[in-house]
Image (spheres, coloured by chain):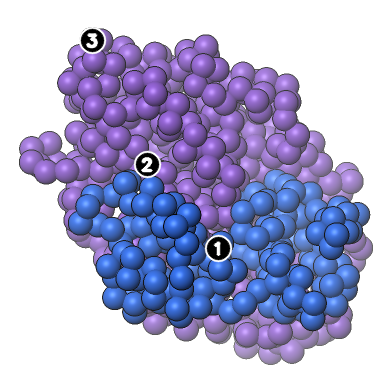
């Protein structure tokens, strides 16, 4: 779907949409959400005094896995929150969506914000947290402001604040905005940022469930994860699980970008073949040939077209194919794309966004970028490919957070799947791509001065 | 250095955090201060530090870490274009080159009349709308083809 021009058809996100079902781009307000059955799950919990443990058990049964990138089971994460902790506990939503290729949380927040609010309130109830923060990516200012409006609506209706709907449960929610730092999408960097500091990730353990925001027990989930919770509570974990596959419950919103006719967000059942998703996005641009796909956001390994066309879109299938579902960002590249140039841009991104805390990442990302840049600009040496792999190996697993791995994985996968293209660049000092009009080497043109 | 409108906004932010965690408001306070002053001078950052009861160095640390703060003066219109891979696959590099040509400046430069500053951005989380331009940090402009860039520049030049 084309997300820029609401109102759009209520099935724009796909026939199997659950979170985005009936969304037309205009109906984001509280009354619209209620008319779609919104806040019924919360009402049911409070009216029937459902025990928190029963809710966690239901979420476990649903096999809902974290939608931000790591795919960690949500119910299990909630169960780590210490039950008997006497002080303040926090619920944090990670809407710091900056993983290249990912733009689903933006659509959830602008078109269905109350699903996230309700999910966070339920999460707070289940884990005993009475205060929540939604950390919104700084670049989407209008959506941050809109979310504040949605919070105000929920507060006025008695869904937020003290004694929600007359019960003895209280929950307060606030919106927080970032200001341009990819690393704050990492959960402990996000906490540092929420505390008013540089977004530098913390050592784990201790995990946020024991030492989180302001040192208090904290649960951090992705926007889409929270948005799925009300449905699970309303319809049962079993039904959610059945929408997907065993261990891969529910639907997932995939952000399809790059060389497709209709880039946009498509919500499909987990386990849907990639070919179906590609078709929903209108197929490859101008009928060109599919070359490669990064199936889970720029930090995940790239896969060649033939592998992708045989792969289903769920956590386990994509892992089996050699990559990861990640955030569900599907970056499609056709045969007009130069893989060296594509990797050069990603390498620059990680170099630019490394927080500088760990030496292997701070120094290594610069080396990676400079070497790929050298190959891209026709100054590569035969030994460069092995050196790149070696540097990547020396970053991966040697840093506090996953940004190091995120920088290393694209390098290793691009070289292993498209080695010939890199060798061609090194030997012939020019690009192997012959299809014009795409993202390929343009001799003499450099976007920015070398780092 | 901070107007009463600015401190009013900062006060509203402060209500979100525990009374002993005023520091949590620093990211929004700096954004508010930048919006009011055009950029963050040392004096402005010191004023934010004083208002939040933070050591100035702790405020500088934040201001130099997050990419959307401007520590140097920028033009009346800061245009930031994402050139990351998903956007580049949909013509954002051509759009960036077009912006450079039309404005006669490179990334991180300001036009001599002080009207425009051009920046290269990293992922805004709007890859489906590529090419995307962020205007003065707060307005996301989608599908910025050369024609739409021309329209935008004409409008902003009025």
Does residue B4 appear left or right of residue A7 in this picture? left
Residue shown at the point (58%, 49%) measured from the top left: A140
Does residue A237 appear left or right of residue A23 in this picture? left
Q: Which residue is mark 1?
A: B36
Count of labels shown? Answer: 3
**Which quadrant of the figure has residue B86?**
bottom right
**Which quadrant of the figure has residue B52?**
bottom left
Tell whether label 2 touches label 1 (CB within 8 Å).
no
Nearest the viewer among A4 and A142 is A142
- x and y percentages locating residue A130 in the rendered image: 23, 35
- x and y percentages locating residue A448 in the rendered image: 72, 79
Residue shown at the point (45%, 65%) measured from the top left: B2
Dot label at residue A174: 2
Dot label at residue A387: none
Q: Nearer the viewer, mark 1 or mark 3?
A: 1
Nearest the viewer among A163 and A450 is A163
Determine whether the residue tagged by mark 2 lies in a helix, strand or loop.
Answer: strand
In this view, which residue lies farthest toward the front?
Answer: B4
Chain identity of mark 3 = A
C-alpha separation, residue under disc 3 versus residue under disc 2: 27 Å
Chain identity of mark 1 = B
- x and y percentages locating residue A94 in the rendered image: 42, 47
Could you classify mark 1 by the number of other residues whose Cα lies within 10 Å: few (under 14), some (14-19), or many (20 or more)?
Answer: some
Q: Which chain is blue?
A: B
Dot label at residue A48: 3
Quarter holding the C terminus of chain B is bottom right
Q: Nearer the viewer, mark 1 or mark 2?
A: 1
Determine whether the residue tagged by mark 3 lies in a helix, strand or loop.
Answer: helix
Is circle 3 on the same chain as circle 2? yes
């Amino acid at each position: 779907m084309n997300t820029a021009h609401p109102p759009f058809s209520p099935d724009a996100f796909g026939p199997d949409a659950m979170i985005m079902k009936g969304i037309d781009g205009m109906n984001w307000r509280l009354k619209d959400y209620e008319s779609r059955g919104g806040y019924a799950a919360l009402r049911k919990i409070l009216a029937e005094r459902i025990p928190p443990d029963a809710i966690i058990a239901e979420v476990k049964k649903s096999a809902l896995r974290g939608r931000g990138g790591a795919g960690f089971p949500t119910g299990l994460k909630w169960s780590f929150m210490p039950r008997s902790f006497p002080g303040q506990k926090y619920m944090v939503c990670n809407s710091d969506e900056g993983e290249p290729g990912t733009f689903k949380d933006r659509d959830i927040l602008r078109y269905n914000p109350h699903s996230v609010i309700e999910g966070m309130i339920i999460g707070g109830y289940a884990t005993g947290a009475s205060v929540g923060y939604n950390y919104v990516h700084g670049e989407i200012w209008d959506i941050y402001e809109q979310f504040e409006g949605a919070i105000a609506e929920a507060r006025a209706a008695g869904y937020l604040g003290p004694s929600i709907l007359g019960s003895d449960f209280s929950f307060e929610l606030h919106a927080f905005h970032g200001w341009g730092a990819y690393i704050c999408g990492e959960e402990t960097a996000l906490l540092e940022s929420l505390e008013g500091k540089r977004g530098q990730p913390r050592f784990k353990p201790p995990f946020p469930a024991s030492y989180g925001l302001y040192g208090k027990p904290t649960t951090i989930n992705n926007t889409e994860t929270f948005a799925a919770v009300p449905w699970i509570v309303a319809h049962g974990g079993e039904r959610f699980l059945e929408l997907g596959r065993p261990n891969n419950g529910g639907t997932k919103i995939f952000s399809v970008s790059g060389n497709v006719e209709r880039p946009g967000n498509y919500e499909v059942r987990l386990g849907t073949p990639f070919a179906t998703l590609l078709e929903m996005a209108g197929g490859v641009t101008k009928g060109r040939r599919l070359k490669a796909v990064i199936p889970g956001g720029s930090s995940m390994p790239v896969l060649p077209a033939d592998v992708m066309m045989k792969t289903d879109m769920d956590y386990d299938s994509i892992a089996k194919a050699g990559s990861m579902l990640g955030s569900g960002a599907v970056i499609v590249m056709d045969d007009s794309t130069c893989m060296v140039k594509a990797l050069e841009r990603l390498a620059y991104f990680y170099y630019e966004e490394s927080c500088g805390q760990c030496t292997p990442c701070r120094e290594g990302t610069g080396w990676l970028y400079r070497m790929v840049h050298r190959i891209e600009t026709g100054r590569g040496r035969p030994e460069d490919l092995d050196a790149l792999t070696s540097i990547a190996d020396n970053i991966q697993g040697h840093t506090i957070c996953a940004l190091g791995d995120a920088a290393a994985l694209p390098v290793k996968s691009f070289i292993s799947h498209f080695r010939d293209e890199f060798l061609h660049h090194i030997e012939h000092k020019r690009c192997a791509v012959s299809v014009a009009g795409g993202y390929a080497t343009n001799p003499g043109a450099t976007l920015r001065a070398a780092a | 250095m901070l107007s009463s409108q600015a401190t009013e906004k900062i006060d509203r932010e402060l209500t979100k955090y525990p009374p002993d965690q005023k520091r949590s408001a620093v990211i929004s306070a700096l954004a508010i201060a930048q919006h009011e002053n055009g950029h963050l001078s040392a004096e402005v950052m010191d004023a934010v530090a004083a208002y939040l009861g933070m050591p100035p160095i702790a405020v500088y640390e934040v201001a130099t870490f997050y990419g959307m703060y401007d520590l140097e003066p920028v033009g009346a219109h800061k245009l930031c274009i994402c050139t990351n891979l998903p956007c580049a696959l949909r013509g954002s590099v051509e759009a960036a080159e077009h912006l450079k040509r039309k404005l006669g400046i490179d990334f991180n430069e300001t036009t001599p009349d002080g009207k425009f500053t051009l920046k290269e951005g990293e992922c805004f989380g709007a890859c489906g709308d590529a090419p995307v331009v962020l205007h003065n940090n707060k307005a996301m402009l989608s599908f910025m083809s050369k024609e739409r860039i021309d329209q935008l520049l004409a409008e902003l030049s009025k």
